[in-house]
């Protein structure tokens, strides 16, 4: 089983000013995939993008955009209980994704609907995503739900464990809806990756990596990357892997450790 690594162009290749130049730099460094945050940059920390120039760079290099973030990314708060802003954003995001050839939009759970049982909050989220799927039907886009850690990066977030995202995804129960397993967030929440993957099965439709602690490139923290990729392989995951970390060295150099680990495992796709 092999994996394409997809540098996140918000965080890597930022030595090049524009997003389209970052795509070209990623291609020149041997990558065939990239990922990004919000396409229009309405929602910080993503920045506005020249989407036509980005599309040209993707087409010219043959690099595939693997994932983009929903805008707004964290929206489910009470009050108000009006999610129309999210629905409009997801429709616009799906149009852009289809145009750029991007197969996945990452959604998150926000801070939930305080004061209610956790399961009820999960079910409410599942209803919102089910509606979102109706709105993007026919676009070919898959929505992937990402749990993000509440201990360090996203205090107050509702879905802080991959297991929570899996619960919501099972309730949605659509082939157009899956889970993004972010190995960094999962580690910060002390999840057992092997156990998570055993429960997840084919619901994992995308993976992102950063080391922990620190959220730097693989090799800067305490995660055992060979064991991580052996676990992903054992679970049958053969999709792309987003490099969503804050590099501590120049971009290309920051990818060397993980590329070497995958090459050793025979798991590095070109
Ligand atoms: O918001 C975050 O921290 C993310 O991991 C986005 O993918």
Image (spheres, rainbow, N blue to C red):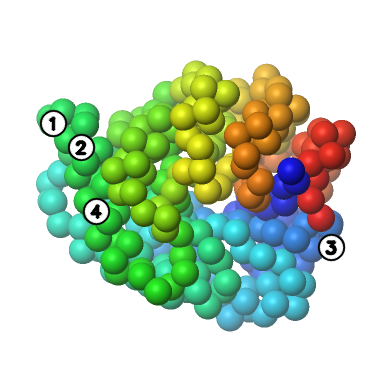
Query: Tag 3's secondary structure?
Result: helix
Q: Are marks 1 and 2 in contact (CB under 8 Å)?
A: yes
x and y percentages locating residue 23 in the rendered image: 71, 65
From the viewer's perspective, is residue 149 above or below residue 239? above
**Label 2 vs 4, first from the N-terminus:** 2
**Label 4 vs 3, first from the N-terminus:** 3
Q: Quadrant of residue 101?
A: bottom right
User: In 3D space, how far apart are the residues under numbered discs 3 and 2 (Cα atoms)?
Assistant: 45 Å
From the viewer's perspective, is residue 205 above or below residue 167? below
x and y percentages locating residue 139 in the rendered image: 43, 73
Q: Residue at x 47, y 69 (%)?
A: 140
Q: Tell me the crowding category of disc 1: few under 14, some 14 to 19, or many 20 or more residues within 10 angstroms, Cα based.
A: few
Q: Residue 70 versus residue 176: which sits nearer the camera? A: 176
Q: Tell me the crowding category of disc 3: few under 14, some 14 to 19, or many 20 or more residues within 10 angstroms, Cα based.
A: few
Which residue is labeled 4 in the image?
128
Residue at mark 1: C-beta within 8 A of ligand 1: no
Q: Residue 189 versus residue 172: which sits nearer the camera? A: 172
User: In 3D space, how far apart are the residues under numbered discs 4 and 3 (Cα atoms)?
Assistant: 40 Å
Which residue is labeled 3 in the image?
28
Q: Tell me the crowding category of disc 4: few under 14, some 14 to 19, or many 20 or more residues within 10 angstroms, Cα based.
A: some
**Label 4 vs 1, first from the N-terminus:** 1
Q: Are marks 4 and 1 in contact (CB under 8 Å)?
A: no
Q: Residue 34 versus residue 140: which sits nearer the camera? A: 140
Q: Residue at x 68, y 19 (%)?
A: 222
**Label 3 vs 2, first from the N-terminus:** 3
User: In 3D space, how far apart are the residues under numbered discs 1 and 2 (Cα atoms)?
Assistant: 7 Å
Q: Residue at x 19, y 44 (%)?
A: 124
Which residue is labeled 1 in the image?
116
From the viewer's perspective, is residue 102 above or below residue 206? below
Which residue is labeled 2 in the image?
121
x and y percentages locating residue 16 in the rendered image: 73, 61
């Amino acid at each position: 089983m092999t994996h394409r690594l997809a540098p996140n162009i918000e965080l890597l290749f930022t030595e090049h000013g524009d997003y389209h130049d970052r795509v070209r730099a990623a291609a020149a460094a041997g990558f065939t995939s990239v990922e990004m945050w919000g396409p229009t940059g309405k929602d910080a920390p993503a920045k506005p993008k020249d989407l036509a120039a980005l599309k040209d760079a993707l087409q010219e290099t043959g690099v595939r955009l693997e994932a983009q973030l929903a805008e707004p990314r964290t929206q489910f708060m009470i009050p108000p209980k009006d999610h129309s802003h999210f629905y409009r954003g997801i429709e616009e995001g799906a149009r852009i994704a289809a145009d750029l050839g991007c197969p996945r939009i990452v959604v998150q759970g926000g801070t939930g609907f305080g004061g209610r049982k956790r399961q009820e909050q999960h079910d409410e989220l599942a209803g919102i995503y089910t509606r979102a799927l109706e709105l993007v039907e026919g676009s070919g886009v898959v929505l992937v739900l990402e749990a993000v850690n509440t201990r360090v990066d996203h205090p107050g977030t509702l879905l802080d464990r991959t297991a929570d995202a899996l619960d919501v995804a099972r309730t949605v129960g659509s082939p157009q809806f899956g889970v993004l397993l972010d190995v960094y967030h999962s580690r910060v929440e002390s999840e057992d990756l092997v156990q998570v993957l055993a429960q997840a099965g084919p619901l994992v439709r995308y993976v992102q990596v950063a080391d922990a602690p620190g959220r730097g490139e693989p090799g800067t923290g305490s995660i055992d990357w060979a064991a991580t990729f052996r676990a992903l392989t054992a679970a049958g995951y053969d999709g792309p892997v987003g490099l969503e970390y804050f590099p501590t060295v120049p971009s290309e150099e920051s990818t060397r450790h993980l590329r070497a680990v995958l090459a050793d495992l025979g798991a590095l796709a070109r």
